[in-house]
Amino acid sequence: MTSVMIGDKLVEDPMGYIVEIVRETTAPIRKGPATMVDGKAISIEALEERLKKNAPGVYELFDFPSKDEIEPDPDLRFVDCHFILVAVSMKKAMEHKDELKALLAGIGWLGKRQEVSYIEAGGEIGDQGLAFLLFALGEALSFWKVLTPRRVLGADIPQDVADLLAGRGLVTANQAA
């Protein structure tokens, strides 16, 4: 991506500046337990004991707060990105709305197509987690909607099917939705 003029400001690294805006305006929020082993929730104490014993298993640790662990704030808008929730500070987001829109216009996958998956966006940005945050920011600013398996197919879809579809890319930013 080449340099972009935003008003009278020359942005030499547009993607870096997009990432800066995303980090300033959003925060990932955990949807499930903080610690899991083999897909099941486990207390941090039990996890520590398993680690001391060098017990086998697939360990998952999530370093994001849950929605219940953050202070209620009417400025925050929460966007579901299937794997995580994203908290968007609307005040900060609105401060960057016009410049973000100008920066995004230079990105092919959003400027030329109606829909893009977090997998493709993550490849462009350099991180799928940042893609979720950008998708949520864009939804909060009404640039697009974040489509997830539940949003597309309804709340009755089994969790394992929703997870499979999301893992294969069905978490998208859709400009027409």
Image (cartoon, rainbow, N blue to C red):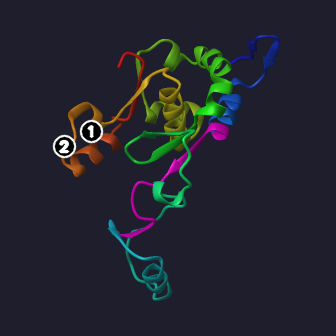
Magenta-colored stretch includes residue 10:
no
Please tell me which residue lies in front, 46 or 128. 46
**Callout 2: few (<14), some (14-19), or many (20+) C-alpha neighbours within 10 Å?**
some
**At 54% across and 41% down in the image, what residue appears?**
74
Q: Amino acid at mark 1?
A: Arg
**Callout 1: few (<14), some (14-19), or many (20+) C-alpha neighbours within 10 Å?**
many
Residue stretch rendered in magenta on the structure = 23-37
Mark 1: which secondary structure?
helix
Q: Earlier in the sequence, mark 1 or mark 2?
A: 1
Label disc, if present, on residue 157 of the rendered structure:
2
Say if 5 sits above or below 28 in the image.
above
Cα separation between marks 1 and 2: 7 Å
Judge from the rendering whether residue 1 lies leftward or rightward of residue 160; answer left or right: right
Say if 24 sits above or below 94 in the image.
below
Say if 5 sits above or below 65 in the image.
above
**At 54% across and 56% down in the image, what residue appears?**
70
Q: Quadrant of residue 105?
A: top right
Q: Are marks 1 and 2 in contact (CB under 8 Å)?
A: yes
Image quadrant where one finds the C terminus: top left
Q: Amino acid at mark 2?
A: Ile
Residue 127 locus on image (x, y percent)? 56, 41
From the image, tell me which residue sits under label 1.
Answer: 150
Image quadrant where one finds the N terminus: top right
